[in-house]
Image (tube, grey):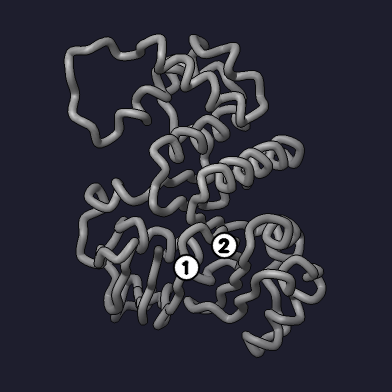
Amino acid sequence: MLELKSVSKTFNAGTVNQKVALNGLNLTMAEGEFVTVIGGNGAGKSTMLNAIAGVFPVDTGKITIDGVDVTNLAEYKRAKYIGRVFQDPMMGTAATMQIEENLALAARRGKPRTLRPGITKADREFYREQLKILDLGLEDRMTTKVGLLSGGQRQALTLLMATLQQPKLLLLDEHTAALDPKTAAKVLDATQRIVEKNHLTTMMITHNMRDAIAYGNRLIMMYEGHVVVDVRGEEKKNLTVEQLLNLFSKASGSDEADDKLLLS
């Protein structure tokens, strides 16, 4: 479903601020895989997601989604393949619109506009059933303005909106980092349910090593712009945080793990 082949990206090349963000990155994801991505600050995690989404062009390499070469495709043209949830809970929703109106926008993404009613009775029933998956009681508040929801509720709604049309690839960029631990756990559980229900190919960046081990069926760790650890299946299920740190030390040749990584 996704292939990154020798992808490189350097910011501010030829200046004193030069930063190699991706360094010959190679990664292949099969359809339905749920990959958690972990690594220290500056490891290239968010740059990789932005490269896949087309936020900026890569210097070298090739990016393929579902057999389509999207390397030179503009961000808005790649949007039909990708669903994305950002770290900021305020980014993915329209605050002054109702919950059902936000869902209607997501459901009609990329489709031609017509003069038919914006939200039909059938639409409302569909949205209600989808909201039940989140287990937050939002199915009984569909006419509530989204700006009145908590950060966690908005982030869960954003997740639902990003997956409503079942994208080829779901990108989650530390989507629970701004939430309190209890709310983050709820959103992560909802993520797991939605991904499994729709068999979505998913990439989730996290700084929390326990979450990286607990969720998904594959874990990769990045260091200096490329993948240094790649575990899946039973090996991933049986991992401990200590073993993961040891794997990182061996693969990177460094005993220094990022503070944020350790504190998580």
Query: Which of the two residues, 201 or 248, is positioned nearer the viewer here?
Result: 201
Q: Which mark is residue 29?
A: 1
Asked if labels 1 and 2 touch by Cβ distance under 8 angstroms, the answer is yes
Mark 1: secondary structure: strand
Q: Residues within 10 Å of mark 2 (few under 14, many from 20)?
A: many
**Residue type, numbered disc 1:** Met
Query: Which of the two residues, 35 or 221, is positioned nearer the viewer here?
Result: 35
Which residue is at a point 52% across and 30% down the rendered structure image?
Answer: 157
Q: Which mark is residue 35?
A: 2
Based on the displayed image, in which of its 4 quarters is residue 117 positioned?
Answer: top left
Residue 109 in the image: state x and y as whole percent.
Answer: 30, 33
* Residue 24 left/right relative to 152: left
Which residue is at a point 36% across and 81% down the rendered structure image?
Answer: 6
Mark 2: secondary structure: strand
Determine if residue 97 is in view.
no
Residue 127 in the image: state x and y as whole percent.
Answer: 48, 21
Query: Which of the two residues, 39 or 17, is positioned nearer the viewer here?
Result: 39
* Residue 19 left/right relative to 150: left
Q: Residues within 10 Å of mark 1 (few under 14, many from 20)?
A: some
